[in-house]
Amino acid sequence: MDAKKFDLGINNAGGENVKPFGNSDRYGYMLGDLGNSLLFNLIGSYLLVFYTDVLGIGAAAVGTLMVVARIWDAINDPMMGVLVDKSKPNKNGKFRPYLLCAGIPVGLMAILCFTAIPGMSESFKLPYAYITYIGFGMAYTAINIPYGSLASVMTSDPVERTSLSTFRSVGAILANLILMTVAPMLVFAADGSASAQGFLKAAVIFAVISNICYFFAFKMTTERIQHNVNDESKEKISLGKSVSMLFKNRALIGIMVASFGLLIAMFLPQSLNPYLYKDYFGNANLVGTASLITMIPSFLVIPFGGKLVAKYGKKEVTAAGFVIATIGYGLLFFLPITNPYIFIAINCLAGIGTGLINLLVWALVGDAIDYQEYITGKREEGIVYAAYSLVRKLSQAVVGGISGFALGIIGYQSGVTQQTAEVANGVKNVITAVPFFGVIIGLLAMIFIYNLTKSRLEEVNDELNSRRSN
């Protein structure tokens, strides 16, 4: 097999000893997702407001733009995955160089997305939005797919991969905290109106911070497993064949379905929480407080992720997380809760489950990459990660559609100070039912589709290590 693992004391292709896996890798990988999430979440949380309130683009036109962008993602992401797989490693590795060469373009495109060019004609605003938003998506894909694939070559140890997944989740949590606390102060004027200068300032600041994170992620991480997939004597990788082979990877299909259910369960409340607290609980001021409190479980489970995986296995702990989340969301759905603080408390219970899952999801993706090599004999980190990344983007698009259609179906009236009791109850039902059924889908996928139990994963890793030593 044309692969070789480099452990402590074994020389790499350049004749240099490879340092052992350690905290430098963990913190470096965390910084990578901190950089990614700052820009991605800024775009996801505030670009719609910028388009409608600053550029003056209609909401329907923006919705069409989002759909077109997701269609292009379905084409662009697999293409980028194959391009990454075909790239040849240099002295810095195969994936780490993308952290430097793609970091500046993704930052620049984010800035352009939030730039209101003085004197821009009305007829050019929508085309400008298409160019910059799709351009940002392509630049983000160019850094996110290599970054996500990087973990699979930093280590093959299950516990070490779990720690990478944990630290990546911490990076995302830190990005969300920064976004929730800093962004509103920048993008809104004193009177609460959207500020064009504020949006631009936020984009510039976040782009600079992100590139600093990318630089240190590059410097602090190490690729320890090299795969010579570009040997000219080997069979060429084609996009069509690579995509078709993904359907044989039960581990990948399982984590894709499970993540789809999980992300719907997590993103839909974020989208509808303002309506829930404003119209159902009658206290719009609780939205920010509820968001911060429900993040606490994500921090509380961090010390336990690695220990639980070492004892029980990643699939087993992830399935347990789905069980906890199902109980929490089930209570929210079935109980006639009218007290917002009880609602928040039960949400925290569900958050323990989703927090466990989020700690492990990236390690599961790394195992799916290994399993792809196990069943096909080819190392294709990029195309596997691209497939998983596409599902995450599609889940966000689905949430946007569900949120809009649901509000219309239950009779929500824009601009009305007080909604009817039927509408308020409808919001509560939607915001609890969708997450409940979403985590059920995730639980079923982990039990019946995802096939890498602790013992099975050990067999796969032993076989891969045997191939790589020959």
Image (spheres, rainbow, N blue to C red):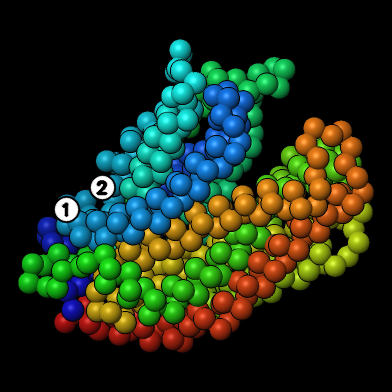
- Mark 2 or mark 1: whose residue is earlier in sequence: 1
Q: Amino acid at mark 2?
A: Pro
* Mark 2: secondary structure: helix
Left or right of 136? Residue 417 is right
Q: Amino acid at mark 1?
A: Asn
Task: Tell me: residue 320, above or below residue 46.
Answer: below
Q: Pick the quarter of the image with the C terminus.
A: bottom left
Nearer to us in this view, 371 or 132: 132
Residue 89 at least partly seen = yes
In the picture of the structure, the residue carrying the numbered disc 2 is 97
Residue count near mark 2 (Cα–Cα under 10 Å), binned few <14, some 14–19, many ≥20: some
Q: Which mark is residue 73?
A: none
Q: Position of residue 216 (x, y in %)?
A: 36, 42
Q: CA distance from mark 2 to mark 1?
A: 8 Å
Q: Residue at coordinates 44% horizontally, 63% vertically from top-left?
A: 388
Residue 218 at least partly seen = no
Left or right of 117? Residue 44 is right
Nearer to us in this view, 217 or 384: 384
* Mark 1: secondary structure: loop
Q: Position of residue 313 (x, y in %)?
A: 52, 78
Proximity of marks 2 and 1: CB atoms separated by less than 8 Å: yes
| Quarter of image, res 19 | bottom left
In the picture of the structure, the residue carrying the numbered disc 1 is 90
Q: Position of residue 96 (x, y in %)?
A: 29, 50
Q: Residue at coordinates 50% horizontally, 79% vertically from top-left?
A: 450
Task: Tell me: residue 325, above or below residue 133.
Answer: below
